[in-house]
Image: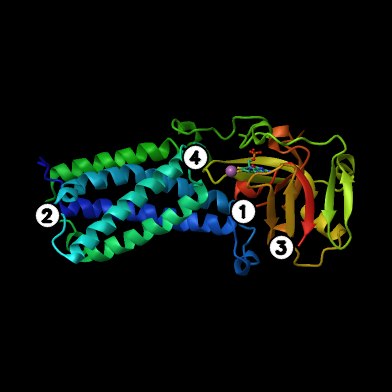
Amino acid sequence: MFTSPLHEPRTAVVLGRWLGAALLTCFLTGLYSHLLQDPPTWLAGHLPSRPVNGYRITQGLHVISGIAAIPLVGAKLWTVFPRLFEWPPARSVLHALERLSIALLVAAVLLELFTGLFNTLQWYPWPFPFRQTHFWLGWLATGGLLVHVAVKAPLIVRYWRGRRPGLAQRRAFLTSVTAAVGVVTLTTAGQSVPWLRGLDLLVPRRPGVGEPGRPVNRPAGETGTVTVPADWRLTVDGPRPFRLSLAELERLPQHEVELPIACVEGWSASARWTGVRIADLLARAGAPAGSGMRVTSLEADGPYRVTELPAAYAEDPLALLALRVNGEVLAADHGFPARIIAPNRPGVLQTKWVARLEVI
Ligand SMILES: Nc1nc2c(c(=O)[nH]1)N[C@H]1C(S)=C(S)[C@@H](COP(=O)(O)O)O[C@H]1N2
Ligand SMILES: [Mo]
């Protein structure tokens, strides 16, 4: 039934190289994102708050390489498809193990890519938690990939270089695959690459659209529970605790910074933020040098209600408790009355509707 001459090792090796590069990029950038969001104690003190656009680039790459991997995985599976129906299913214990590892690899990679893709749509049609699943599947897929490369190493070496003349059909097939990767990449990359924004045909949201000029993740209404009390005061806990009303915050020295929100879902959008330096609030609370800060939101619950700013971020002059964006008071959805904005960190940590800051 499989009559195409392209079900052969050279095509599989060429596609495998591209797919391997995409998956490795995905794994490393994903691991980095995970460490930023949940830094182990030994790392928290060493995470740098610069470059300002660092996370925008690594997470942009994460989503770009993940989306590019989808057509690549399709082409790779099509190429090796006949092998999946080999008979007898196992010739030896080793052969059975190898086929099992392929089953694990294919399942983990497919589930990983689709949970990731659906996450960029904020669509979770499954009963398990996204983050933990995506994280552990990443390890499974990468482990499976390493085993696969090790088992196939002799074949990979033999077919690494093409023979001349090459197969015309192969060239046509690989060109089609490249075109497919090009299309899905160019029509989605504009989420994080500003100069590709004009081509954003397949993105779930357009950074730059929304009030005011930026998308909203988790609007105040959706979180259901964010109500700002009329007598809202910022509480700052530390050696010299204090509380400030919005009017009092506005009378403190205001600073303006241009910083992006870079969401884990792959979109990022820059804005001009105005507010009080976190470092100034730390100093006022009598925090010793090297202190970090714990931030608590007015939100009743939710995974991002409490976040932490390690010292490098808390002391960065660009890190603000922002009261305004692009010159206007924060909209309810964007975190009124005050939100965190700091350089080089995931959007999930740019806490909205801040109630309390605590020196740690
Ligand atoms: N308290 C709180 N802050 C939050 C969130 C949240 O769910 N709760 N979502 C975060 C996420 S995932 C992102 S990407 C940014 C988005 O900010 P924006 O809605 O102003 O664009 O806010 C962050 N701040
Ligand atoms: Mo986000």
- Please rate how many residues cluster around mark 1, counting C-alpha atoms within 10 Å: few if below 14, some from 14 to 19, many from 20: many
On the image, the x and y values in percent for residue 337 come to 78, 38
Residue drawn at point x = 11 percent, y = 45 percent:
5
Q: Amino acid type of disc 1?
A: Asn
Give the Cα separation between the discs numbered 1 and 3: 14 Å
The image's mark for residue 191 is none
Q: Secondary structure at mark 4?
A: helix
Which residue lies at the image location 66% right of the left edge and 46% below the top edge? Answer: 259
| Residue position for label 2 | 88
Which of the marked residues, 2 or 4, is nearer the chain's N terminus?
A: 2
Counting from the top left corner in percent of width and height, residue 46 is at 63, 67
Residue 137 at what x, y percent from top left?
42, 54
Q: Is residue 80 visible?
A: yes
Give the labeled residue for mark 1: 344
Which mark's residue is nearer the viewer, 2 or 3?
2
The label nearer to you, 2 versus 1, is: 2
Gap between marks 2 and 3 measured at Cα: 60 Å
